[in-house]
Image (spheres, grey):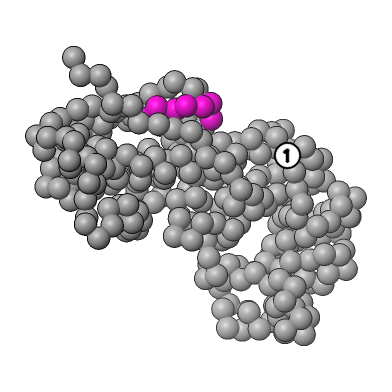
Amino acid sequence: MTPTTEQGLRAAGLDPEQVRRVVGTALAEDLGPLGQDVTSAATIPADQVDTVDVVARADGVVAGLHVAAAVFEQAAADAGRTVEVRLVATDGDRVARGDVLATVTGPTRCLLTAERTALNLISRMSGVATHTRAWADALGGTKAMVLDTRKTTPGLRLLEKYAVRAGGGTNKRLGLYDVAMIKDNHKLAAGGITAAYRRVRELFPHVPVQVEVTTVDEAVEAVEAGADFLLCDNMTPATLREVVEVVGDRAELEATGGLTLARAAEYAGTGVDYLSVGALTHSSPILDIALDLRHRG
């Protein structure tokens, strides 16, 4: 991974070492027990050098350019070679079908070995960013922001959550360690909202606490217990407005459950701070992105 790519990843809030592990795992999955691309090894001379263009095949929002660069660089490094990557677009850009997003020059075998892994990652991330931008646009003019959830692809959480940010969304918690989320099962197991909140506070006094609530009474109990963030699950807009009124500024409020783009503005208009949408990461279609080898003159 070149210093430029590492800098780009860090600037995006991504740990280069974690990205390196994801890339290494993905390449190993493709190369299998032989550790090589048998098609490219058989058909392309080892010393052949070419340039490829990473091209959008559909309109959308791009994310993951530095991640794709890391794939090409790693595939080349594994072969004892190097590539030159030039990014034409920037993560978060709106792109159109036919736009060149990046160009890569290097050993042709390495370029084609890296192709599918690089495209899998950037297409997935760009799909998440594109979907997120649609939600962010739908919430325009309100104070509400769109949030992601933990409904992510195993092993790709940091990349998918970065893609949400690139699309104009906001990350919630990264895992089970940075925010305590008291949900219905926790309430039942602990004997209620207040008891569950107190137990979290006793063991983890500095961890932010969010409580899932389904009624106005539960919202009142949660804020009186001390919760600073309420997840309002499957509430109607009318109920959300009531919660906003009784809670005031004592806690941040998040609407979740069954939300759709068509009703996003309606829910945002209730005065909640966030709309959380699991579909950003569990159901976003990819953005079609391809790799085109330039014709040899």
Q: Spot the residue most to the top.
A: 297
Magenta residue check for 56: yes
Res 98 quadrant in image: top left
Q: Which residue is mark 1?
A: 261
> How far from the left and from the top, in percent, is residue 87?
32, 30
Q: Is residue 279 left or right of residue 124?
A: right
| Percent x, y of residue 211 | 71, 68
Quarter of the image where the C terminus is located = top left
Instruction: Give percent across and percent down for residue 237.
Output: 86, 49
Q: Which residue is located at x 67 percent, y 52 percent?
A: 276
Nearer to the camera, 173 or 71: 71
Above or below, 66 against 174 in this view is: above
Q: Circle 1: is it few (<14), some (14-19), or many (20+) Cα within 10 Å?
A: some
* Residue 161 x/y as whole percent: 51, 51
Amino acid marked by disc 1: Leu
Q: Which residues are magenta?
A: 54-60
What residue do we see at 70% from left, 35% from top?
138
User: Who's the residue at 54% across and 56% down the image?
Assistant: 152
Q: Secondary structure at mark 1?
A: helix
Question: For the point 61% across and 71% down, which residue is it?
Answer: 180
Whether residue 137 appears in magenta in the rendering, the answer is no
Whether residue 66 is visible here, answered yes or no, is no
* Count of marks placed on residues: 1
Using residue 182 as the reference point, say whether residue 240 is left or right of it: right
Q: Which residue is at the front of the view, 86 or 191?
A: 86
Residue 211 visible to the viewer = yes
